[in-house]
Amino acid sequence: MSREQVVVEQTRRAFQTGRSRPLNFRIQQLKKLQSFLQERQKDIVDAQKKDLSKNKYVTELFEMLILEAELKLAISRLAEWAAPRPVEKNLLTLTDEVYIWPEPLGVVLIIGPWNYPWCLTLLPLVGAIAAGNAAIIKPSEISLNSSKVMEEHLPQYLDKDLYPVVAGGVPETQELLKHKFDHIFYTGSTTVGKLVMEAAARHLTPVTLELGGKSPCYIDKNCDIATACRRITWGKFLNCGQTCIAPDYILCESVIQSRVLEEIKKCIKEFYTDNPKASDDYGCIINQRHFKRIVSLMEGSTVAFGGDVDESQRYIGPTVLKGVTGESRVMEEEIFGPLLPIITVDGVEDAIQFINNREKPLVLYVFSHDTKLIKRMIAGTSSGAVLANDCISHFVDSALPFGGVGYSGMGRYRGRHSFDQLSNLRSCLIKQLNLEVVNSMRYPPHTGRRLAW
Ligand code: NAD
């Protein structure tokens, strides 16, 4: 029996004891998760520095604070989320009890990515615990140092049998995927997402797939270009472009292309100095494979700014590409790195057509003062989310369900949406055994009866 099989069976047995269900237990575990994040903060920050050259401030701002807010929300709202939800009654159910009761699904498998290994692995865990499930946590082996901290320390805080951490890479994940779960929550690439869904289908296991894709960013020529470019530069080069919701490419009219380029250059220098390689605020590419992949994406495009690389440090400077078309190498796959192509289009309708000719993205970004234009883009396209006049910040709002559509994923999470996603929203109808007379018309024999409708 493999180690993974042992863990899956042990977790299922722990779930069957029923101890993950009481609300006070769920809250206690969520509070322990809070203690873990507070007490192990230094280990987490150090691991992120080693894996991705992320500084302390970035780790705290983009991982810890979001997790802390999610935990506080779940703890304060759990009773409300878990309560039976009465539904509207009709003539037939007037005297009955009719409600939706969220019950735990069972054992959830969480497969995390490496780019924000804490937030994107533990946010689904908050939802799983809040919904009363057991969960097996499989952190990404690529962010090895974070994975080690999680494997070593998390079991000291959480119920070890209900929430085990299984570290490992592809073979371990594939072994886990052979087994039956009640839900699989996967965050990562579309390619692996398909494999996860295939494995899940063998057991009819429902999946949440948080995938990637090429998120477009349209800049209207009549907007405040300086502010737009400042926000885009931040969203793109944060974590060296290794953010699933980073703007992948810019679409704008050719009349503003050089202005956009100048403003982005200015912002890169302001944020990361003239020498981003030496900047504490600019990270590195996670590994050699991704480094080589990103460098090869520049082929065939003109480097308008940056383009400097150093393989020994897995460094790729903030880079802007021009002369890019829909057929360029850089448009063949999600960049997931610090390259920002600018593609020129003939206005908003042309941009909509360009977007609709490709797979549905995780986010559509649009910068404009014109609300009508923004609404036109929303109506004319499809994506997991739309964010107008900013980048990234929709992820912070847990009232908005986060997720993709089509190739960018399926299922939604954050806050109450995580709770619902990882619950069985069970329909409950409690009738009485009296008033049998109202049922008389349904019983046979029906011969000779007529319905008046
Ligand atoms: P990945 O898909 O290669 O890895 C993610 C996880 O899958 C890891 O735990 C890994 O062990 C496992 N895995 C990898 N190959 C596997 C295989 N053949 N069989 C079974 N399991 C396997 O992740 P990546 O490509 O390095 O991550 C980048 C991608 O993730 C980007 O496309 C990015 O957009 C996406 N992403 C999406 C979100 C989101 O919230 N939508 C967040 C972060 C990253």
Image: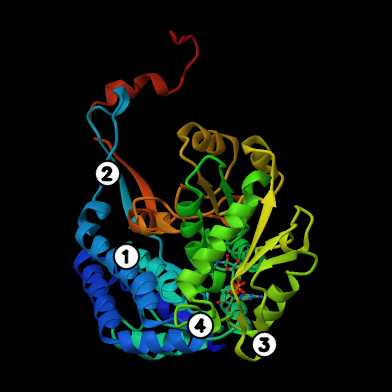
Amino acid type of the residue tagged 1 in the rendering: Gly
User: Circle 3 sits on which residue?
Assistant: 311
Separation of marks 4 and 3 at Cα, in angstroms: 15 Å
**Residues packed near mark 1 inside 10 Å, few (<14), some (14 to 19) or many (20 plus):** many
Spatial CA span between label 2 and label 1:
17 Å
Lower position in the chain sequence, tag 4 or tag 3: 4
Q: In x, y percent, where is residue 121? A: 44, 72
Q: Position of residue 273 (x, y in %)?
A: 49, 76
Q: CA distance from mark 1 to mark 4?
A: 33 Å
Q: Secondary structure at mark 3?
A: helix
Q: Residue 128: which quarter of the image?
A: bottom left
Query: What kind of residue is marked 2?
Result: Arg
Whole-Å distance between the Cαs marked 4 and 2? 44 Å
Quarter of the figure that contains the N terminus: bottom right
- Residue named by callout 2: 85
Depth check, mark 3 against mark 2: the one in front is 3
Q: Earlier in the sequence, mark 3 or mark 2?
A: 2
Residue under label 1: 132
Report if the CB atoms under discs 1 and 4 are less than 8 Å apart.
no
Q: Residue at x 22, y 52 (%)?
A: 80
The answer to which of marks 4 and 2 sits earlier in the sequence is 4
Q: Nearer the viewer, mark 1 or mark 3?
A: 3
Q: Quadrant of residue 100?
A: top left
Q: Earlier in the sequence, mark 1 or mark 4?
A: 4
Q: CA distance from mark 1 to mark 3?
A: 46 Å
The residue type indicated by label 4 comes to Leu
Q: Nearer the viewer, mark 4 or mark 3?
A: 3
Give coordinates of residue 56: x percent, y percent. Answer: 36, 82
Residue toward you, 325 or 48? 325
Q: Residue at x 58, y 59 (%)?
A: 262
Reading the image, the residue beneath label 4 is: 52
